[in-house]
Image: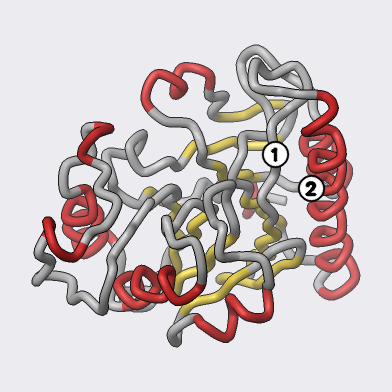
Amino acid sequence: MAIFAISDLHLSFNKPTGLFNVEHDEDVYKPMDVFGWDRHYEKIRDAWLETVGEEDTVLIPGDISWGMNLEEARHDFEWISQLPGRKVMSPGNHCYYAQSKKKVRQALPGGMEWIDADYTVVEGVAVAGTRGWNLPGDRYWDEERDRRIYERQVGRLRLALEAVVRDCPDLPRVAMLHFPPVTKKITASGFLDVMKEFDVRTCVYGHLHGAAHKEAVEGEFEGIHLQLVSCDYLNFRPVPLHLEEVSSR
């Protein structure tokens, strides 16, 4: 049994679809070909089947479906459910269907979980998740627009980790965010501060694509192991969660 991670699947199936019978022009309403992700769901499928076993778990931190509502996203959830392993998902900035955590959970097929400002336990590890947000100082940051959302998301990460401490204080802690908690230009944030306060040892995140990969901070950073798991960064292949440092504590 192992834990893997991959984010930003950006699926857009418009009807129930099997793993191997996708009619690209008919079944996909928002193809990612314009970004060079030609039939990327096939790459995800093949790499997933080669990598992940039925007893494994895959963390998927955000931007899973382009669906604007749960009825549209449901087709993507059902496609993912056909892949092996347990799936633990959390929201991204394009998860427009995720207005209600309760409704998302009710829409999920078996073997799939949704966490948002809370946590789940995977293989003896407490995984806390929330979306995250743009960081102060980022080129896309707008103080009037972003400050309230940013502070709320920092608070939601805190809520998730407080629940971990309350319910399972002895378990090692992993955070899954969609937005990066730091970048090469922005090396401090409320997300980083909360993770350090609660002794998070590994954080997986996505959101960065293409040329933005160069902004990513990976590896050990102020005592936390950071992993960028955007699927184009990973060549669409789920990667093992870094757990050496977690397990040693």
Expressed as whole percent of the image width and height from the top left, the position of residue 146 reads 78, 33
Expressed as whole percent of the image width and height from the top left, the position of residue 13 reads 28, 65
Residue at position x 84%, y 75% from top?
A: 167
**Closest to the observer, 44 or 77:** 77
Residue at position x 90%, y 70% from top?
A: 166
Whether residue 194 sits left or right of residue 171 in the image: it is: right
Kindly identify which residue carries mark 2. Answer: 153
Expressed as whole percent of the image width and height from the top left, the position of residue 208 reads 48, 31
Which three-letter amino acid code belongs to the residue tagged 2? Gln
In the image, residue 167 above or below residue 214: below
In which quadrant is the N terminus drawn? bottom left
Q: Sort mark 1 into few (<14), some (14-19) or many (20+) by Cα contacts within 10 Å.
A: many
Q: Residue 133 carries which label?
A: 1
Residue at position x 55%, y 50% from top?
A: 243
Residues under numbered marks 2 and 1 in contact, where contact means CB atoms less than 8 Å apart? yes
In the image, residue 182 above or below residue 9: above
Q: What element carries label 2?
A: helix
Whether residue 8 sits left or right of residue 126 in the image: it is: left
Which three-letter amino acid code belongs to the residue tagged 1? Trp
Residue at position x 66%, y 53% from top?
A: 174
Q: Which mark is residue 186?
A: none
Q: Residue furthest top?
A: 185
**Closest to the observer, 92 or 194:** 92
**How many tags in the picture?**
2
Quadrant in which residue 73 is drawn: bottom left
Quadrant in which residue 85 is drawn: bottom left
Expressed as whole percent of the image width and height from the top left, the position of residue 211 reads 40, 18
Q: Is mark 1 on a helix, strand or loop?
A: loop
